[in-house]
Amino acid sequence: MFPIISGNTAQPAGNKEGLFAYGDVSGVGAVTTRNLISNAGVIASDASGAGTARSQVGGCEYGDDKGIFAFGSGKVNMSNLVSNTGVVAADGPSVGTGRYDTGGASYGGDKGIFGYGNWAGGTTYWNGSNKVSNLGVVASDTGGVGTARYAIAACEYGEDKGIFGFGSSQSQTAGTTIYNLVSNAGVVASDNAGVGTVKTFHAACSFGAPPKDQGIFGYGRSGATEYSITNLVSNTGVMQSDTAGVGTARYSLSSTQYGGDRAMFGFGYASSLTANVSTTNKVSNAGVVAADTSTVATARSGVSGCSFN
């Protein structure tokens, strides 16, 4: 995708808009609701979604300007494509191991990958992955690599590579700092010893110019403690130490790119408020997280995000 010129202002290459979809609403349960995000980072009111209502869904981009949601609560394995105008499609074919709390990232410039997750309930975790073609076709399972875990997050870095990070393993239920790099051919590498605070049920997203040059992991929980801390990922895939938290500490949230080079964390559950929230926190193209922004969206947790256009 080439830069778009509007007047004298050059827009960076990369997906300009985003959306949050699915999740769990208190007193209602799982929903398909979606909220679009403009290229200026403004989140729209609720719109009808599509497909099976569920939470803890994975999301990523594919095909340069489209997105995909896949898997989710109930240990399902269907997917829902997102057009380059932000329309979520009906359920697609069921492929691969059904699971929830999986991570999703793009790689190779126009493809995606979903990896890890909880596939049998309890503490039976998974370390396989499923690639997504540049046409949005989800492939069958690829053999596992690294420590099996769930409540993981993933994002892009270095423009065409990905990273899975943190999460809960069977031996470290409160969380780990392990991360696994994904090459520009979609090959998942073995474990790297991470840095920073262990965390689960967090979110991750890419940012920076060139687009998807760096990544950021943030928020989440370890045991009963919730965080707003973040960890940046360099353009060579090196996880950085903790950055002081900003905004409401919470978990079971999501994130997405917008504006071509920026990111946004949104939604989640905050124990300090004993409630789901619809709060968002913008991330600049330098990786700086902003204070809480109130939104018009319905508060929910277990939300998924991706970008498009």
Image: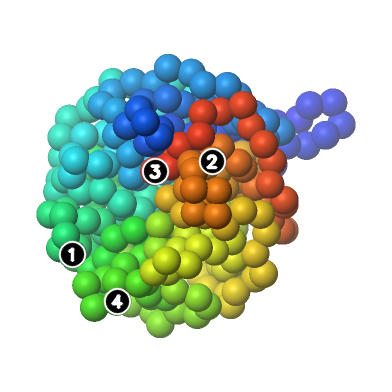
Q: According to the image, what is the colour scheme of the structure?
A: rainbow
From what the image shows, is residue 6 above or below residue 178? above
Q: Earlier in the sequence, mark 1 or mark 3?
A: 1
Q: Earlier in the sequence, mark 1 or mark 2?
A: 1
Mark 4–mark 1 contact, CB under 8 Å?
Answer: no
The answer to whether any part of residue 125 appears in the image is yes
Q: Quadrant of the N terminus?
A: top right
The residue under label 4 is which amino acid type? Gln
Q: Which mark is residue 230?
A: none
Mark 4 and mark 2: Cα distance apart in space: 28 Å
In this image, 114 relative to 33: left or right? left
In this image, 92 relative to 208: left or right? left
Mark 4–mark 2 contact, CB under 8 Å?
Answer: no
Q: Which mark is residue 277?
A: 2
Question: Counting other residues with Cα less than 10 Å from the Cα at mark 4, is it few (<14), some (14-19), or many (20 or more)?
Answer: few
Q: Which residue is the site of mark 1?
A: 123
The residue under label 1 is which amino acid type? Thr
Mark 2 and mark 3: Cα distance apart in space: 11 Å
Q: Earlier in the sequence, mark 2 or mark 3?
A: 2
Q: Earlier in the sequence, mark 4 or mark 1?
A: 1
Q: Which residue is the site of mark 4?
A: 172
Mark 1 and mark 3: Cα distance apart in space: 19 Å
Mark 1–mark 2 contact, CB under 8 Å?
Answer: no
Question: Counting other residues with Cα less than 10 Å from the Cα at mark 3, is it few (<14), some (14-19), or many (20 or more)?
Answer: many
Where is residue 245 drawn, in percent x and y?
65, 64
Q: Which residue is the site of mark 3?
A: 302
Front residue (pair 138, 103): 103
